[in-house]
Amino acid sequence: MVVEMPQWILVLSNFGFPIAITIYLFTRFEKKLENLEEVIIRLSEAIKGGTK
């Protein structure tokens, strides 16, 4: 006897893991981009202060 799985379970099993990894990586990259933005702003201020 063959039991068919509902369509949404098949979609979730095929795309659930990549979606979860993508969300995880986006949140990690967002934190790193915020830190990078802060460093660039400080560097810009240091350059402006040094050229006056």
Image: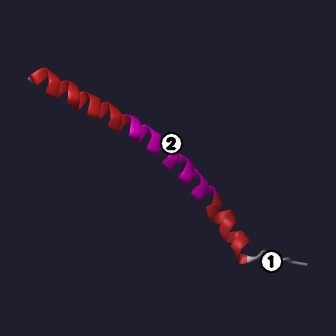
Q: Main secondary structure of the magenta part?
A: helix
Looking at the rendered structure, the kind of residue marked 2 is: Arg
- Residue 49 falls in image quadrant: top left
Q: Which mark is drawn over residue 24?
A: none
Q: Which residue is mark 1?
A: 4
Q: Which residue: 66% across, 70% down? A: 11
| Quarter of the image where the N terminus is located | bottom right
Q: Which residue is mark 2?
A: 28
Looking at the rendered structure, the kind of residue marked 1 is: Glu
Q: Is residue 46 left or right of residue 12?
A: left
| Quarter of the image where the C terminus is located | top left
Query: Is residue 28 part of the magenta span, yes or no?
Result: yes
Name the secondary structure under disc 2: helix
Q: Earlier in the sequence, mark 1 or mark 2?
A: 1
- Residue 33 falls in image quadrant: top left
Query: Is residue 34 part of the magenta span, yes or no?
Result: yes
Q: Which residue: 67% across, 66% down? A: 12
Q: Is residue 18 left or right of residue 42?
A: right
Q: Which residue: 71% across, 76% down? A: 7
Q: Residues within 10 Å of mark 2 (few under 14, many from 20)?
A: few
Q: Is residue 18 left or right of residue 7?
A: left
Q: Is residue 24 above or below residue 4?
A: above
Q: Residues within 10 Å of mark 1 (few under 14, many from 20)?
A: few
Magenta region, residue range: 17-35
Q: Is residue 50 left or right of residue 24?
A: left
Say which of 36 and 42 sits in front.
42
